[in-house]
């Protein structure tokens, strides 16, 4: 499938030197630009923040929902991100520290929660976050120390980023008529239904295609996944250095 | 949005890290390791049906600096052909935009792992002599390694030695071809190298924080960031540190004086006081092993006598026995 080798943003090219950064755009005077940036950041961080409040602060679901809403309302209305300096910390760390500060000061926060009817209310799918927490419950019981909570938050951020990238990939494949590519990727790389992993030959038989097509389709989907994940990550970083550090941390690219 | 399990996240991470080999003759066979700017994978070259190691940049390079550095490393390696230096086979770009080069896949153990095995001091020192050879050759071609340390030396199953990871090599002379020299990156002196807490490596040479050396194995002038002043004696210091590592005595033992003198000379703070070349250092180690005079340890009459006796112990014992017998015969001859 020659087509598989030259679709998408890879194609042997480099990233353009200047990329849109949601962190920078969130400080923009242009309301449309700000909204777009905040949508992206909230989309990537709300689940980790909600789960973190539930686990680290042991808050009941309803209270955690309110605190999550409150946190992102502050991000939107109070220019939280104006204080973020990529030279000093990673955005994930900054977010987590801000959440800790807010929840620690809960009495104050609680009074703010009772705000007027014009307060921003974000439409967030808390039920799905609760379901995910339920699935992770056995592992979460082992989490006790602040260090492992930090690790938990980082892990959830990576999961959130990858989930967004997978969704974008699903849409991209649908738009390009590559549903089969995504389906194979879904079965081979995402599915955890407990069965033994299907081989390329199994998949070829199941879908009535050649094993080499399975290889090519999967290579395409993985390449696109990598491109999309890096693109999203880049959008969530303020500068090239931060992006590089984050990519290494998130993709597990640690210097030996 | 679909839920991703920890296993799925791990698989996606692996998938995102794997080099995109579509459109190349290579087939993925596994991950080998990671360096300062890239990852090394084991791939199969389907044209020649052989396994080679592929070094790939971690990420597509926005500025082009890392690409240039990786390509320079490949070109430097291509210029210094020596049995003790891993040969480069191919260079190019992957479909995802990352630059790569392939090189010989070295099967063996890292020097630090090898040294942990039951090798005797003599075996370790003989191996050290072999490490000096490719370094001396590179110096003769005007190439400074700048990151010599046990993990960057591979020992093959037959005792062959390969010096690896020339990613921060510096061209310091005009001996190497102009083509390679033209690929040299700006190598400005970093004002204050920062130590990477994870790798223990020092960065600061470029905006991308390329590894410049490793504390404990790095010459003082290199640690101070005096890049322009570096020459082969910076590598001599690192070789001295490797020798110190290999000659480390067991608990309760002491490093022999002559050997300790070699280490001290190789690791002298003042570059002028070090060995002038890697051959000279290797020659002193060989001299130590063979009981010959060495540069690092000037001897007086008594010292020379002790060394000669130690070196020719059997002959000395025979002569002494002969003399004792003669004396006994003279004294006890019946009158």
Image: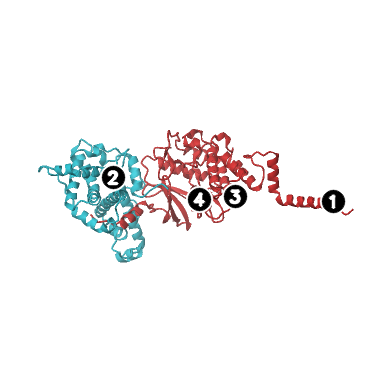
- Tell me the SS state at disc 2: helix
- Label 1 marks a residue whose chain is B
Which residue does the numbered mark 1 point to in the structure image? B330
Which residue does the numbered mark 2 point to in the structure image? A92
Tell me the crowding category of disc 4: few under 14, some 14 to 19, or many 20 or more residues within 10 angstroms, Cα based.
some
Q: CA distance from mark 1 to mark 4?
A: 59 Å
Residue A53: x %, y % from top left? 23, 49
Mark 1 or 4: the one toward you: 1
Residue drawn at 70 percent across, 45 percent down: B308
Which residue does the numbered mark 3 point to in the structure image? B126
Q: CA distance from mark 3 to mark 1?
A: 47 Å
- Label 4 marks a residue whose chain is B
Q: CA distance from mark 3 to mark 4?
A: 15 Å
> Which of the 4 quarters of the picture holds residue A111?
top left
Q: CA distance from mark 4 to mark 2?
A: 37 Å
Mark 2 or 1: the one toward you: 1
- Judge from the rendering whether residue A105 lies leftward or rightward of residue B323; answer left or right: left
Q: Colour of chain A?
A: cyan
Circles 4 and 2 on the same subunit: no
Residue B71: x %, y % from top left? 45, 43
Q: Nearer the viewer, residue B320 or A53?
A: B320
- Judge from the rendering whether residue A164 lies leftward or rightward of residue B176; answer left or right: left
Which residue does the numbered mark 4 point to in the structure image? B112
């Amino acid at each position: 499938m020659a087509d598989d080798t030259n679709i998408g943003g890879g194609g042997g090219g480099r990233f353009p030197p200047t990329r849109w950064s949601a962190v920078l755009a969130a400080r923009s005077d242009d309301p449309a630009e700000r909204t777009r940036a905040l949508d992206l950041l909230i989309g990537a961080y709300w689940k980790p923040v909600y789960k973190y409040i539930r686990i680290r602060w042991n808050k009941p679901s309803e209270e955690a929902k309110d605190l999550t809403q409150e946190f992102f309302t502050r991000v939107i209305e109070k220019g939280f991100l104006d204080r973020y300096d990529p030279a000093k910390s990673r955005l994930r760390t900054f977010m987590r520290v801000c959440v800790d500060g807010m929840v620690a000061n809960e009495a104050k926060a609680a009074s703010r929660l009772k705000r007027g009817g014009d307060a921003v209310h974000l439409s967030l799918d808390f039920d799905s976050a609760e379901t995910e927490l339920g699935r992770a419950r056995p592992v979460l019981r082992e989490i006790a120390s602040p260090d492992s909570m930090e690790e938990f938050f980082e892990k959830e951020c990576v999961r959130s980023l990858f989930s967004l990238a997978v969704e974008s990939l699903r849409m991209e494949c649908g738009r390009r008529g590559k549903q089969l590519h995504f389906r194979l990727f879904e079965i081979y790389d995402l599915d955890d239904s407990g069965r033994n992993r299907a081989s390329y030959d199994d998949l070829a038989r199941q879908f009535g295609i050649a094993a080499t097509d399975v290889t090519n389709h999967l290579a395409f989907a993985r390449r696109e996944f990598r491109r999309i994940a890096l693109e999203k990550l880049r959008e969530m970083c303020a500068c090239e250095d931060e992006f590089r550090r984050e990519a290494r941390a998130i993709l597990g690219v640690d210097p030996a | 949005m679909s839920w991703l399990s920890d296993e799925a996240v791990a698989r996606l991470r692996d998938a995102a890290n794997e080099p995109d080999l579509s459109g190349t003759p290579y087939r993925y066979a596994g991950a080998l390791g990671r360096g300062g700017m890239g990852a090394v994978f084991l791939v199969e070259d389907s044209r020649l049906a052989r396994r080679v190691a592929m070094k790939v940049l971690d990420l597509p390079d926005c500025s082009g600096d890392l690409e240039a550095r990786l390509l320079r490393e490949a070109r430097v390696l291509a210029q210094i052909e020596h049995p003790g230096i891993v040969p480069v086979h191919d260079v190019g770009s992957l479909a995802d935009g990352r630059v790569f080069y392939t090189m010989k896949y070295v099967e063996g153990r890292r020097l630090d792992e090898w040294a942990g095995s039951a090798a005797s001091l003599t075996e370790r020192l003989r191996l050290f002599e072999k490490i000096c050879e490719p370094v001396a050759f590179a110096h003769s071609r005007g190439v400074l390694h700048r990151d010599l340390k046990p993990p960057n030396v591979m020992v093959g199953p037959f005792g062959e030695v390969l010096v690896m990871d020339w990613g921060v090599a510096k061209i310091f002379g005009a001996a190497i071809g102009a083509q390679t020299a033209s690929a040299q990156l700006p190598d400005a002196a970093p004002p204050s190298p920062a130590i990477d807490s994870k790798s223990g490596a020092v960065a600061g040479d470029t905006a991308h924080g390329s590894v410049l050396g490793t504390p404990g194995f790095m010459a003082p002038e290199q640690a101070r960031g005096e890049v322009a002043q570096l020459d082969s004696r910076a590598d001599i210091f690192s070789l001295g540190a490797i020798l110190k590592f290999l000659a480390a005595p067991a608990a309760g033992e002491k490093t022999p004086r002559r050997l300790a003198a070699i280490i001290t000379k190789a690791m002298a703070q003042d570059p002028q006081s070090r060995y002038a070349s890697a051959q000279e250092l290797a020659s002193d180690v060989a001299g130590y092993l063979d009981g010959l005079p060495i540069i690092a340890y000037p001897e007086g009459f008594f010292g020379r006598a002790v060394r000669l006796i130690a070196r020719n112990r059997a002959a000395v014992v025979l002569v002494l026995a002969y003399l004792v017998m003669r004396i006994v015969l003279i004294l006890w001859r019946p009158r």
